[in-house]
Image (cartoon, rainbow, N blue to C red):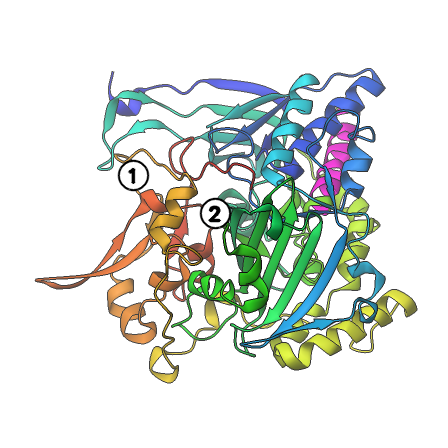
Amino acid sequence: MSEAAVPRESMDYEVVIVGAGPAGLSAAIRLKQLGQKGGREVSVCVLEKGSEVGAHILSGAVLDPSGLDELIPDWKSRGAPVETPVTDDRFYFFTRGAGIRIPNFLFPPLMSNHGNYIVSLSNLARWLGQQAEALGVEIYPGFPAHELLIADGVVKGVITGDLGVAKDGHHKADYTPGMELRGKYTLFAEGARGSLSKELAARFGLQDGRDPQKFGIGLKELWELPKDRHRKGLVVHGFGWPLGNDTGGGLFMYHWGENFCSIGFVVHLNYSNPWLEPFSEFQRAKTHPAIRKFLEGGKRIGYGARAITEGGFQSVPKLSFPGGALIGCAAGFVNLPRIKGSQNAMKTGMMAAEAAFEALKAGRAGDILAGYDTAYAKSAVARDLWLVRNAKPLWSKLGTLLALPFIGFDMWTNQLLGFSLFGTLHHGTPDYATLKKAKDCRPIAYPRPDGTLTFDRLSSVFVSNANHVEDQPVHLLLRDPAIPIKVNLPEYAEPAQRYCPAGVYEIVDDQSGPRFQINAQNCVHCKTCDIKDPAQNITWVTPEGGGGPNYSNM
């Protein structure tokens, strides 16, 4: 039998869910709960590209438990890994040598972390997966959704990635074609900049009439601290140094468990200096005296990076389309000032599940889940984003120093008075179009890592447990292979070398001149390249199933 003639297997479900994160698993659980309550079982499967549920889940994370309360009210007695309440909530503005604490009373109530918990979101996802499977949900880790199944303008499901394809495209001895997973409705919970969600937005015009989605890159390390450095329940958020005033972002540090410290850094991807390296800014931030004092004597045991949606209210796309819907960070429900989105991801997963269940109960299939869009518009999620809708535009327009007081004032007026003196501000240029030419910007000299407090990219990728089958097609596709050298290198000093947090992209000089090299095996699936490349020349697609990072306690 020829390679082209190998048939695909097909499996049919009522609902197919792409992504086993908080949104996807909440949708699956709610569908089963509704089926039990309404006496109508719903067949549900969840596809997960990671090697196991939770392997690709990365977040800070301080959890607002409202979504979990709604989904599984007795989560505490069921042993959910949500055990460290926030006991000390601090905000700082950092200069090079000082940390200036901002009094908590200056922040509106929505910014308080009282009642929230410090968690490992990857561990929470694993637990949610167990709850879903106990209800009869079929979960398939290591099976990335690679292609859309669309017929007559209706999404009919997805096709998983082929296995056993060599780098040159030929089928190896263990070749297995991807499967067709067909559903009456398909929910996409791929997280920020999902490859199929991006395709759906373009095909169905989901972003038409909305502001462009905005993003940040979040980098995180997990540390084990000595007892005398650990402050269980401490939450620290900081802004300012080492970033310049015209670059948005900041640091977070969360102490949880018996000796864990989650420390991370976010850089808004609308930065303009092509010489900036988000990874190196993160390493530099840890050397601040206010942060160093906690980490010294500790040991770094984990690392990861992931894009974050930051557009908020103005950038939320149309959520439903014929045959399916976007849920969670695939649509972008992160509250940027609060640095939280998990509760909104869970709630939107539940809302979409409820709309799909009502459609199935009425005997419908493949139509637009208009009830989901309506439910979102009236929901606490929409209000949560509406209250902070001007934070990102103000930060982008005014810079950090001037924006922060205006953002605080705007959130106070929104929460207390129900309106903003600014109205609704809008996002301007997409993130990929904000870079200035390299010749017009000052290169940044970053200190060499010391291997104790600060680290290089490759040693960081090692502790992310990233792994890909070496002989497989590169999953970072170039629309035009000539652009990195002919355009990006002379104009922007090829910024992929610097915005990638995993050393995937290199300019290698050989006898024939500079060459653009892609080290795809290093990829931690952050999607930054797909977002920030100034020529929009890089497209991230799913690699062979199970590839990528394998996060533990992240």
Q: Residue at x 73, y 47 (%)?
A: 344
Tag shown at residue 473? 1
User: From what the image shows, is residue 348 above or below residue 359?
Assistant: below
Q: Position of residue 470 (x, y in %)?
A: 27, 36
Tag shown at residue 272? none
Identity of the residue furthest to the right in this view: 417
Q: CA distance from mark 2 to mark 1?
A: 36 Å
User: From what the image shows, is residue 53 above or below residue 206?
Assistant: above
Identity of the residue furthest to the left in this view: 511
User: From what the image shows, is residue 265 above or below residue 376?
Assistant: below
- Please tell me which residue lies in front, 229 or 157: 229
- Name the image quarter holding residue 406: bottom right
Which segment did they paint magenta? 344-362
161 to the left or right of 95: left
Q: Earlier in the sequence, mark 2 or mark 1?
A: 2
340 to the left or right of 225: right
- Please tell me which residue lies in front, 475 or 63: 63
Q: Residue at x 55, y 78 (%)?
A: 246
Q: Is residue 449 magenta?
A: no
Give the mark toward the camera: 2 or 1: 2
Q: Which residue is mark 2?
A: 299
Q: Residue at x 73, y 65 (%)?
A: 389
Query: Mark 2: which amino acid?
Result: Lys
